[in-house]
Amino acid sequence: DFEFSWLGNGQLELRIVNRRYFTTLDDITVVWALRVNGFVAETKALAFPTVLPQKSAEVDGASILQALAHHNIQQLISDGDSEIHLDFSASILGATLGATSERVEVASDQITLSTQGKKKSKLPYPKHLILCQNNDKGRLVKAEPDSMSLTANGFTISLVDGSFIYQSVTDSTKPIVSSLQPNLFRAGTDNDGVKQLGDQFFDKSKPLGLWLTLGLDCTTLEDLDVTLSSKKINFSGDAMDFPSFVTKARIFGHPGRRKYEGITLAEKLEDSSTSSVKLGKWEQQVTMVGNGSVYVEITLDLEESLRDLPRVGLQFTSPCMGKACFFANGP
């Protein structure tokens, strides 16, 4: 059994109780996780001394207190607009239960440090990141040129196929942002020529055929060139240089690669052997600052012949987000 209590003001009392009659708890691993509005801000294994049968012992919570200080939890608690919890999970090797060598959870507990009050935070986790700007320890950004990655404050950026994957170090299964790509296409309408019979690929008054022959609906980044660079960003009131990666590539369209059942123009294009089309150039600079935030700058240099484009924009996926806030003149 576990007895945990949060006394507030940076004080934490931890005690573990061994209710076994014959053995210690040395076969148990305890892991704690600090959650801010559902996101795992930090997680570590909890070290505790040998506890004899039917005895208890105090547990050193220094690593937890360090995490609370690093993530400015006391400030978030004072603001009263965040859900903050400490989760504890105890596990043993599955072999103890006659299963595989995977660990099996046998106990868990949770301490509530703060619940949302009347104020609702529209940006719960970014707010946590912004507060970390004032922590000098969070200013270190680790650049790995060989693996083309940047890491800071529990977040990492990895460059992949001209784009990047932005994710939490503690949960690499669901990226926060990935597959940032140029978007030069939109769904066609009647006015664009959706109902054409397939013989008007170059009808300027009905541009869908032209868009499809250029492959605007299926673009890739090729001929990649990636270099390690830096960018000066105002951080915690100071202009500081942070590492970044600059990716240069060519944008190609691939006509006929996407299937559009029932649209005659698209179906005829699928049957033709059309080569890739050079659409322009792509330059991306990705910079990570000490609190884990990411700055991305994109420059698109499109071919002069591309006069009539349905869209010039960007697209990306965000598997871990259920909600997002967008600050711009748009969307």
Image (cartoon, rainbow, N blue to C red):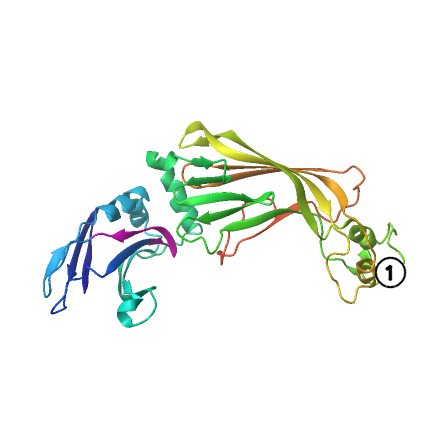
Residue at numbered disc 1: 198
Relative depth, front residue between 331 and 201 = 201
Quadrant assignment, res 136: top left
**Which residue in the rendered view is the most extreme toward the right?**
199
Asked if residue 113 shows in the view, the reply is: no
Q: At which x and y percent is residue 144?
A: 46, 37
User: Crowdedness of circle 1 by 10 Å Cα count: few (<14), some, many (20+)?
Assistant: some
Residue at image coords 18%, 53%: 48
Residue at image coords 33%, 71%: 99
Instruction: Give the total number of marks visible in the rendering.
Output: 1
Asked if residue 64 shows in the view, the reply is: yes
Q: At which x and y percent is residue 224?
A: 63, 39
Image quadrant where one finds the N terminus: bottom left
- The reply, left or right, for residue 44 in relation to residue 133 is left
Query: Which segment did they paint magenta?
Result: 35-47
> The residue under label 1 is which amino acid type?
Gly
Relative depth, front residue between 259 and 197 = 259
- Type of secondary structure dominating the magenta stretch: strand
- Based on the picture, tell me whether residue 218 belongs to the magenta stretch: no
- Based on the picture, tell me whether residue 39 belongs to the magenta stretch: yes
Q: At which x and y percent is residue 321?
A: 49, 56
- The reply, left or right, for residue 106 in relation to residue 159 is left
Residue at image coords 9%, 62%: 55
Q: At which x and y percent is residue 227?
A: 56, 33
Relative depth, front residue between 106 and 200 = 106
Residue at image coords 86%, 49%: 204
Give SS at disc 1: loop
